[in-house]
Structures are given as structure tokens and as C-alpha cells.
Amino acid sequence: MERTPLPKPDLKYIKMPDLKNGYLYKIHARNATYGIWDDKQQGFYISRIKFGSNFIFMEYHWDCEAFATARPIEEVEKSPFENIHYEHGKDSGGSWAYFVDEEGNSDEEFLEYLNKFEGDRTGRR
């Protein structure tokens, strides 16, 4: 699957009040082209690959005050991950963040779902 280029400043996108929690959207973002919207975080859960690792990451909506990197352009479908949230904080071991699905789905199931839409982004042929 080919990467979508970053949007021009005048790109029309879906505003936060019009997004549905737990739905999958096609997005223009730094690290993904699909993401699942989280109302509370005001961002999209994405599948990110960095240094060969695949992990869940948050890209925040373009209209957020901080770290705005994602513009949703199209609703795709209701995802199977409705009761989700992102936990993060700091302790003596440093910063930590992880995905919590109250339905009992694993990170691997979440990533498998998103990667189905993203395609192979490892650079391998």
C-alpha cells in the first residue's frame, strides 16, 4: 500500500465533534494512514513501526492544542475496539505508556486489525 502524502494546509478534514469514538478513519498523519478515534484523548490510535518494532501509538487531531499531527479525511468503519483508552505516566523507571482494551483484546489483535489496512510498511519485499 502506498503512503498518502502529507496534506496541503487547506485540506478539508473531519472536525472533532463529527468523529465517532472507536471508529476507524483514513487519516493524513506523520506515521500512519489509518487510525481509530478516541474521544477522550482527542487522537487516533495507530500502528507505528520504528526501528523494526511495531507498536500502538497516538496521533492527535489537527485541532488539538498540543502535538497536532493527524487530519481525518474519511470514515471507514466501526472498529471492533470500542472500549479503549491509553494509559501513560512517569515513575522511577521513566516514562511509560500502554493501550488498554476493556473488552479483553490484546495489543497484537489491535495491531493486526490496523495493519490489515496499512499494508506492509516494513520495507521488505
Image (cartoon, helix red, strand yellow):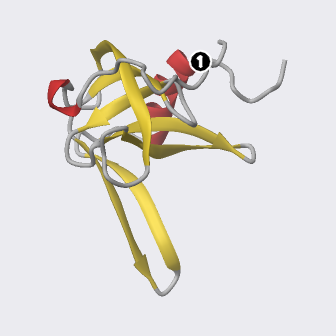
Instruction: State the image coordinates of residue 122 (x, y, percent, origin top left).
Output: 74, 30
Left or right, 101 with respect to 123, comes to left
Name the residue rendered at 64%, 39% in the picture.
49
Instruction: State the image coordinates of residue 51 (x, y, percent, origin top left).
Output: 75, 48
Task: Give the residue type at disc 1.
Answer: Thr
- Residue that lies at the very extreme toward the left in this rendered image: 17
Residue toward you, 31 or 98:
31
Residue toward you, 22 or 14:
14
Rendered image quadrant of residue 35: top left
| Relative to 86, residue 114 above or below | above
Name the residue rendered at 36%, 24% in the picture.
72
- Residue that lies at the very extreme toward the right in this rendered image: 125
| Relative to 1, residue 45 above or below | below
Q: Quadrant of the N terminus?
A: top right
Instruction: State the image coordinates of residue 60 (x, y, percent, origin top left).
Output: 38, 43
Name the residue rendered at 35%, 30% in the picture.
36
Left or right, 25 with respect to 78, comes to right
Instruction: State the image coordinates of residue 50 (x, y, percent, origin top left).
Output: 68, 45
- Residue that lies at the very extreme toward the front in this rendered image: 10
Crowdedness near tag 1: few (<14), some (14–19) or many (≥20) residues, C-alpha within 10 Å:
few
Task: Report the number of discs.
Answer: 1
Mark 1 lies on residue: 4
Q: Quadrant of the C terminus?
A: top right
Rendered image quadrant of residue 121: top right
Name the residue rendered at 30%, 33% in the picture.
37
Rendered image quadrant of residue 106: top left
- The kind of secondary structure element at disc 1 is loop
